[in-house]
Amino acid sequence: MILCIDVQYSEDIAYIAGGIFKDWNADEFEKVYKTTLSNIADYEPGQFYKRELPCVLKLLNQIKEKIEVILIDGYCFLSLENKEGFGAHLYNALNKEVPVIGLAKNPFRGNDFSKSLFRGGSIKPVYITSIGMEPDEAYTKVLKLHGDYRIPTLVKKIDSIVREMEKESHDFDIKIDEDNLSK
């Protein structure tokens, strides 16, 4: 199974979702896992893994299926010298047993280490890095992902799911406040 994960932050809460699918060209998840984590670390430039890793590990503890590859929104490496990004930290936390492919929407400064992939006639690429899998193989796999646009269908869907989780949480908070006011 392939796992596509994303995390959305709001104040000190993280909303985490992961969708699993079998085939690289799938357009729907077979199953989606969701969780939240509070008291998350503050964002530190170049140290994003400190914030993201506990969130993703919490989600992975829920998943029963055997995961063969993980897709993340971000980078596995941050330089040609293999400065580790979130993807590399995740790979190491998983005992180097599950390859990680990073799909980043924005270039990282000095971005001369990722493979640029232009999908669907877009003039902007996605930036591909990987660990536990050769970069050319990761590039080919991302090229196979379903979708006619720059961002693959399931990457967009998991992003929408975490955004909806955050929105629903805020809607719930507003409803509770309104209930308390009416008493």
Image (cartoon, grey):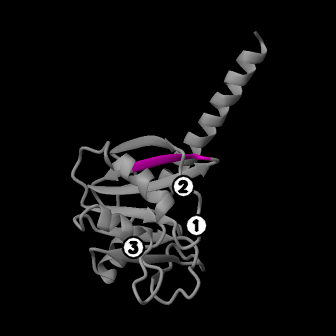
The residue range painted magenta reads: 12-18
Extreme-right residue of the structure? 181
Mark pair 2, 3: CA separation: 34 Å
Q: Quadrant of residue 174?
A: top right
For the residues bearing labels 2 and 1, Cβ distance under 8 angstroms: yes
- Circle 3: residue type: Leu
* Residue drawn 49% across the image and 74% down it: 119
Magenta stretch, overall SS: strand
Q: Residue at x 36, y 75 (%)?
A: 130
Query: For numbered disc 3, what is the local secondary structure?
Result: helix
Left or right of 11 in this view: 38: left
Q: Quadrant of the C terminus?
A: top right
Does residue 158 appear in the picture of this structure?
yes
Spot occupied by residue 112 in the image (x, y as percentages of width and height)? 50, 90
Q: CA distance from mark 2 to mark 1?
A: 9 Å
Q: Amino acid at mark 1?
A: Glu
Q: CA distance from mark 3 to mark 1?
A: 31 Å
Query: Eyeballing the image, is 7 above or below 117?
Result: above
**How many C-alpha atoms fall within 10 Å of the one at disc 3: few (<14), some, or many (≥20)?**
some
13 inside magenta stretch: yes
First in sequence: mark 3 or mark 1?
A: 1
Q: Which residue is mark 2?
A: 41
Residue 23 sits in which quadrant?
A: bottom left
* Residue behind mark 3: 143
- Residue under label 1, please give it: 44
Q: Nearer the viewer, mark 2 or mark 3?
A: 2
Residue depicted at x 37% and y 68%: 89
- The correct choice, above or below, for 169 with respect to 135 in the image is above
Q: Does residue 174 belong to the magenta stretch?
A: no
Q: Is residue 28 above or below residue 180?
A: below
Specify the label residue 66 is tagged with: none
Which residue is nearer to you in this view: 13 or 6?
13
